[in-house]
Amino acid sequence: MHEPGIRKTFKPGQWPMRVATGLALMVTAIIYWPVVHANFVWDDLVDFRDNAWLTHGHAWMHYVLRDFNHWTNYFRPLIVALFTLQVRLFDVTPGPMHAVNLGMHLINMALVGLLARHACRAAGRDDRQTTLMASLCMLLYGLHPVLIEPVVWIGCQFDLAATLFMLLGLLANISIKAPFTRAAVVALMFLLAAGCKESAASFPLILAATDWAILAKPRETGLRQALATFASRNWRTFAAMLVAGLVYLVVRYWALGHLIGQYANGPSSRFGRLQEACFIYLQYWRMLFLPMSGMGPVHPVDVHRFDPISLYPLLTDTVALSIVAVGLYFAVKRASAFGCIVVAMTAALIPVLHITSVAFDSSLYHERYVMTGLAVACGMLPLIQWPPLDHHLQRPLGWAIGAICATWFLFATIAIRTTIPLWSNSINLWRWALIVSPKSLDADNNLLSAYIMSKDYDAAQRLVDKLQSQHVQCTPCMLNAAILANAINEPDRALIALEQVRSSREILVDKPLFSQYLLVTGQALVLQGHLPDAENLFHAATRLNPLNPQPWQGLSVARALQGQAGQARQALSSALPLLPPNKRNDARDSIEKIIQMNRQHASPHAARP
């Protein structure tokens, strides 16, 4: 059977397209360039600076498969391996890792441009229109403010890489003529995307929507013929993706010991879960058109608000389900490009709509989750055909559209340049988060950590006092309050805060929290002079998390203060390889100073840890 598709290859030597593509990439790189001066924030601090999961010996081989960042549901070996390469190659320096994020974003931009060129050809546009529209689609994707988070935050390389492989899969499906080769390449891209992030599960549906819009051409052949052509062309590809999906599930089960291991505390009823999914779905559409409204690193929402039946949630459900239904109707029945874009966007969002009860973080949604859907939508925009206009209206309408585009790109540039500094250090990030979400305990706790890390103890104490005056139930906040008290040499105050931590439920189920509790309690006991008890706690903490250098350092301090110089150096030798290279000399000098002071003054309580 004759196989529809794009038979003519693009001419890569066409200078207008090359120049336009290069300019779009260069403009985006310049606008985002300040990101290379940003620091580690949020999970990056734990993953790359505070723990030696990826930097020490062969431990990375374990964390590539499981337990990275204490995750139980996530299996993302390709990006954890990429992180390992980066932290070792760049010596745990954030700048080059941010440059990797930017480079991946620019590659995705170029792939969106290629997809848009295919869409232009399918829509019958000439070379001039193709050059213009593909470049605008690239810029719309590259400069859309909703993607600031994944470009600026190193931890979003999961999302960037998954989107990259899915775009490559879509382009392979359009470009490769040989059916079996096409099926093999597309299935490989699907498997690679799944190895980056679980959201790749949406790829088969996205591919179906783009193939239907660009290649099946139901308007030209009729619905029945288009369906037959679609099935004939793609059955091998979907069979190959099914095999790839099964391979992924087998490897995932082997690595994690389960497919889904932790479930979320969501709405108690099915209707509540439907309302939650519809609410999240509309939030993502809002982000596309009003990206700066409510933008922030966290979006905490009480999920139990979705259980009761009331007018507003019912209206939300109606609007969300109507968007899906109208998109499907126009995509299938009317062969509408706009309908296909809605279907592709919806398919890309399915993994993050909380349809299943898989545990997510405390935020219901994040800006970065729009990335794949936005990329596909931008690549498909040239398929939309505008009705023919009167000759006299074409020029003024062109000027109006140009003015709108210029205004949007100016707005996007300002948004990017003003938001990058907010993501560039932890204090700015969490102050901003509290402005957007003033009731977020995660933001309170992370801001408190940032103050302590930067040694702004006055600001940290004010925040602790505020939380305590409001009787906030926040176990991590109280743990940070104890860390602050230790830092200002008030161990009695630290132990009061630690008592609240000890009596909490979280400490019974949260292994990292319990390990940190042991560490901070040991530090308080050192300050009080209870060195043998502190040593026991540090020992326990090293057993819980042997790749955290802090318990080893605490153990070294406790032994040095007891006059056990040899054992102190031995504990320090376990800590040094786990520390970033630029902190090792300071740690070594600190222990040697304690040993010397202990020898000179014979006073084990004279020095602080």
Image (cartoon, rainbow, N blue to C red):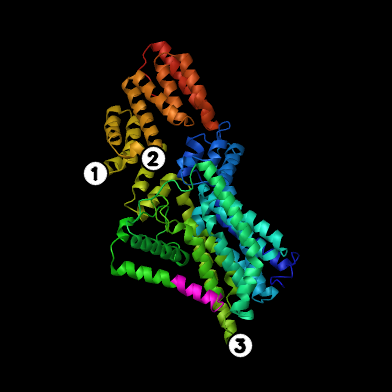
- Pinpoint residue 535: horizontal percent, then vertical percent: 39, 21
* CA gap, disc 3 and disc 1: 69 Å
Whether residue 82 sits left or right of residue 265 in the image: it is: right
- Mark 1 or mark 2, earlier in chain: 2
Vertical placement of 464 versus 381: above or below? above
Please identify the quadrant where the C terminus is shown.
Answer: top left
SS state under label 1: loop
SS state under label 3: helix
Please give the range of residues in magenta: 323-336
Residues under numbered marks 3 and 1 in contact, where contact means CB atoms less than 8 Å apart: no
Vertical placement of 303 versus 471: above or below? below
**Which mark is on residue 449?**
2
**Which mark is on residue 391?**
3
What residue type is disc 2 on?
Ser
SS state under label 2: helix
In the image, 312 versus 249, the foreground residue is 249
Residue in the image at 42% along x and 22% along y: 555
In the image, 176 versus 523, the foreground residue is 176
Whether residue 273 sits left or right of residue 47 in the image: it is: left
What residue type is disc 1 on?
His
In the image, 593 versus 382, the foreground residue is 382
- Pinpoint residue 386: horizontal percent, then vertical percent: 57, 80
Residue in the image at 48% along x and 45% along y: 258
- In magenta stretch: residue 335: yes
Whether residue 75 sits left or right of residue 116 in the image: it is: left
Residue for badge 1: 471
